[in-house]
Image (cartoon, grey):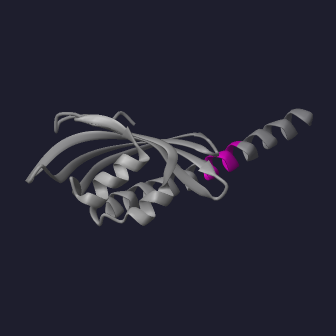
Amino acid sequence: MRTIYIALLLIAFSANSFAQDTTITQEITELSKAKWEWMADKDVDKLTNLFHDKSRFVHMSGSWKKDRELEIIESGSIWYKKADVHDVVVEVIADDTVLLWNRITLTAHVRGNDVANEFTVTEFYHKEGEDWKLLDLTFSKVRDTHEIAH
């Protein structure tokens, strides 16, 4: 009888954990999608709230911190015009820590030209209070045939 109770508790715990992971996965996927729109719209107010104060950004031309990324977005020196998201993988590490990978085609305006590049973008999120904060955004240049393993 005791074994049955333990098994039922384990099943209930697993189901609850799965449901919570699914909720977090949906929340982070939607937040990432909104982030691409805010970047395209140059909405630095929303991005300021999303980006953690110690966040880092890694691009093909270098890496920098939050203030520089916001300056780049606001000035339009890199204008993230459109991110076509082809695939998303989310890994919930803990209730407050999530990794997300996007496979995207990014159309951006850089140095006076529109360019399109294929990237896998790694996003690292941490929850502070009720808000998710982006700690890292890393662009990895890939071929258009690149796939993210699920």
Is residue 19 magenta-colored? yes
- Residue at the image position 8 percent from the left and 53 percent from the top: 112
Residue 73 in picture, x, y percent from top left: 30, 56
Task: Tell me: 133 left or right of 105.
Answer: right
Question: Residue 131's image quarter?
Answer: bottom right
Relative to the observer, which residue lies in front, 31 or 70?
A: 70
Q: Quadrant of the N terminus?
A: top right
Vertical relation: 5 (above or below) 26? above
Q: Quadrant of the C terminus?
A: top left
Task: Tell me: 8 left or right of 48.
Answer: right
Residue 32 in picture, x, y percent from top left: 41, 54
Is residue 137 magenta-colored? no
How would you classify the magenta stretch by its main secondary structure?
helix
Determine if residue 26 is in view. Answer: no
Relative to the observer, which residue lies in front, 110 or 17?
A: 110
Residue 26 in picture, x, y percent from top left: 50, 56
